[in-house]
Amino acid sequence: MRQLASTRYRVFFLLILALLGTSAQASIPSGMLSGDNPSLAPMLDKTLPAVVNVVVTGKAQAAPSNPLFNDPFFRQFFNAPQQQQQQQPQMAHPTATGSGVIINAGKGYIVTNYHVVHDAEKIEVRLNDNRQFKAKVVGTDPETDLAVIQIKADDLTQLQLANSDDLRVGDFVVAVGNPFGLRQTVTSGIVSGLGRHIGSPADGQGSRYQNFIQTDASINPGNSGGALLNLKGKLVGINSEILSQSGGNIGIGFAIPANLVKSVADQLIKNGKVKRGMLGVVGQNLTPDLAKAFKLDVDQGVVIAQVMPDSPAAKAGIKERDVVTQVNGKEIDNFSDLQNAIGLRSPGDKVQITLLRDGKKQQVEATLSNASSMTGAGDATTGGALTEGLAGAQFGPISQDNPLAGQVKGVQVTGVQRGSPAAQAGLRPGDVITSVNRQQITNVSQLHKLAGPDVKQVLLHVRRGQGALFLLIE
């Protein structure tokens, strides 16, 4: 059995070596394989000094005490004082490590992830040459998971930022960081995808503005804030997230594009925070069912479900049921695209918006306002399209305790049976239906008339809290 086990081990080991050899060969372009000793080392010699290790000491937290110390037998056996009834909790300072990238050597500015320095009491930066410096936070932006910190040091090296819009799927990239505290770890791979939206992680602290670069270059805990480089040694992204059930790398990592990094970092250095533009709309993804209901021959875009009064959108003439397809000539496929296109610009910026209204293409110009001056604008919950109608829902007049009472006219959803077609279609108790198939309603009789059993398709306009959305019922 030993001999057999040993043979299996050798075969498995050789197989792993073969796979590793294939992977390494696939990760390096053919142009770098020429010569006696093909290597990324010349490029890395110039770039590694600009990638730093960030060690964060968190704010003091009460460490759990050992219940044994409070046991009466324990106190008697060790002759502990009786008055010491409870052990005082010990205060511990949690520590964590991440990575950062020097973007301005003269002033010592370093960009990293917000989640790396969040709630830090002390930040220490360790350079490639083993020098160590205390760092201060210049500014943070949880919405993009970016932060800028600063050290006072001489003889620093900075990275040049590439135009991340030039990236293509299949481009070779190199990830540099400090995974698990292993300093200056380098991995290579390719760009696996662009414009990724991955939603919020389980802890709910994910970035709101997402346009990630996906890569199979190995990224692990501690790589956060590290560099994603092209083969010219230019920064194309800041490593930020991994997709994994175990917490380790499975070949799916995400980086924040360099163009976004530059835009946010510039504002953080100048203002200490990011001032965002606001259009003043609530929208939802254009689904095939909604496109059919609106009689459109497109299947991508954002349906405007609500326009805020006196907002830039209202002043530009944008209306409910308009479908936004482009901003400044860039395609808008979903609400995340629209959110990035608007929210990553500054108040006062002018944007050209291409939209469809009743199937006809139009273009309007809007001057963005300050996001902090407006409330209630955001993403609407995407509605479902089902065939069993409104069964399982109860309707009535708008109740006085509904926050929308006195603000809108319509019919309130007073109850929704769990698992019913109405529930699966997306209706919730407290929703207010303001129109059915584009006709305004003010009472339940009108609802039953317009959405009766003989109606095959029902398009509802629903107000929910301070938001709005469309629901298509078939």
Image (cartoon, rainbow, N blue to C red):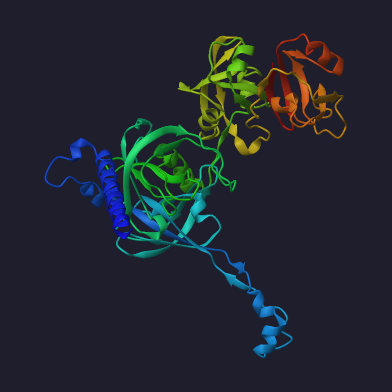
x, y percentage for residue 278? Answer: 59, 32
Is 257 on the left-hand or right-hand side of 45?
A: right
Residue at position x 36%, y 31% in the image: 169
Viewer-proximal residue among 148 and 232: 232
Q: Residue furthest left?
A: 36
Camera-side residue of 2 and 186: 2
Locate the N terminus by quadrant: bottom left
Q: Residue at x 58, y 21 (%)?
A: 286
Against 178, residue 290 (above or below) is above
Q: Is residue 467 left or right of residue 43?
A: right
Q: Quadrant of the C terminus?
A: top right
Task: Residue lying at the far front in this picture: please name it.
Answer: 1
Tell me: residue 357, above or below residue 311.
Answer: above
Q: Position of residue 153 (x, y in %)?
A: 35, 61
Residue 301 placement: quadrant: top right
Residue found 47% across the figure and 59% down from its top: 136
* x and y, in percent, of residue 15 in the image: 28, 46
**Number of numbered discs:** 0
Judge by depth and name the residue closer to the eye, 16 or 217: 16
Q: Is residue 160 visible?
A: no
The image shows residue 2 at horizontal and vertical percentages of 32, 60
- Residue 299 visible in the snapshot: yes
Q: Is residue 319 above or below residue 152?
A: above
Which of the 4 image quarters holds residue 307? top right
